[in-house]
Image (tube, rainbow, N blue to C red):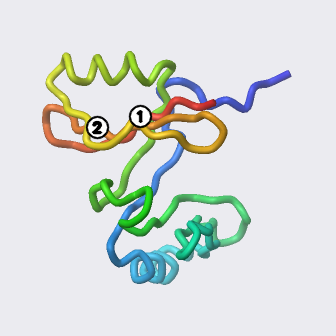
Amino acid sequence: MASNKPVVGSIAWIDQTSPIADDVRDFYAAVVGWRPAPVSMGDYNDYNMLLPNADQPAAGICHTQGVNIDIPVGWLVYIVVEDLDLSLAACLERGGRVIAGPKTMGQGARYAIIEDPAGAVAALYAPE
């Protein structure tokens, strides 16, 4: 039986966190044809952006608030790692820094946002 667990080293997800998430949602709906699907965050919605002709999510658009308050504005790729703690230690040893996290998502998946020595930002994601 095949596993649904993402492959280590692959990109599992991409999203953008923005203080103007509703405007960004509408921008990408008009520019690339993505369709927004609300994701309740309690007292506001973030959005899965669905492919134009399918109910498959292509990306996320999130508000810079709540659990995303410390995430920098911009597109963020989530790179799958085997062991988040070991990857974060390697990040620090190699001149990177941890910007946010580690945080838990879902039923045990964890992620953290890092900055590499060149200043580029990415998320490291360890699935459940």
Q: Secondary structure at mark 1?
A: strand
Q: Please provide percent x and percent y for residue 48.
A: 59, 65
Please state which amino acid type lies under the numbered disc 2.
Ile
Relative horizontal placement of residue 9, taking residue 122 as reference (left or right): right
Relative horizontal placement of residue 12, taking residue 15 as reference (left or right): right
Locate residue 111: give its quadrant: top left
Which of the marked residues, 1 or 2, is nearer the chain's N terminus? 2
Locate residue 85: give its quadrant: top left
- Dot 2: few (<14), some (14–19), or many (≥20) neighbours within 10 Å? many
Locate residue 102: give its quadrant: top left
Classify 13 as above or below 16: above
- Dot 1: few (<14), some (14–19), or many (≥20) neighbours within 10 Å? many
Q: Please provide percent x and percent y for residue 108.
A: 61, 34
Query: What is the quadrant of the C terminus in the image?
Result: top right
Q: Secondary structure at mark 2?
A: strand
Residue in the image at 52% along x and 59% along y: 59
Q: Which residue is mark 2?
A: 114
Relative horizontal placement of residue 20, taking residue 119 as reference (left or right): right
Distance in Å between CA atoms under marks 1 and 2: 7 Å
Residue in the image at 41% along x and 69% along y: 63
CB under 8 Å between discs 1 and 2: yes
Q: Which residue is mark 1?
A: 124
The numbered dot on residue 53 is none
Please state which amino acid type lies under the numbered disc 1.
Leu
Classify 111 as above or below 81: below
Q: Please provide percent x and percent y for residue 58.
A: 57, 58
21 or 108, which lies in front? 108
10 or 39, which lies in front? 39
14 or 64, which lies in front? 64
Q: Please provide percent x and percent y for residue 43.
A: 55, 75
Q: How many marks?
A: 2
Relative horizontal placement of residue 47, taking residue 2 as reference (left or right): left
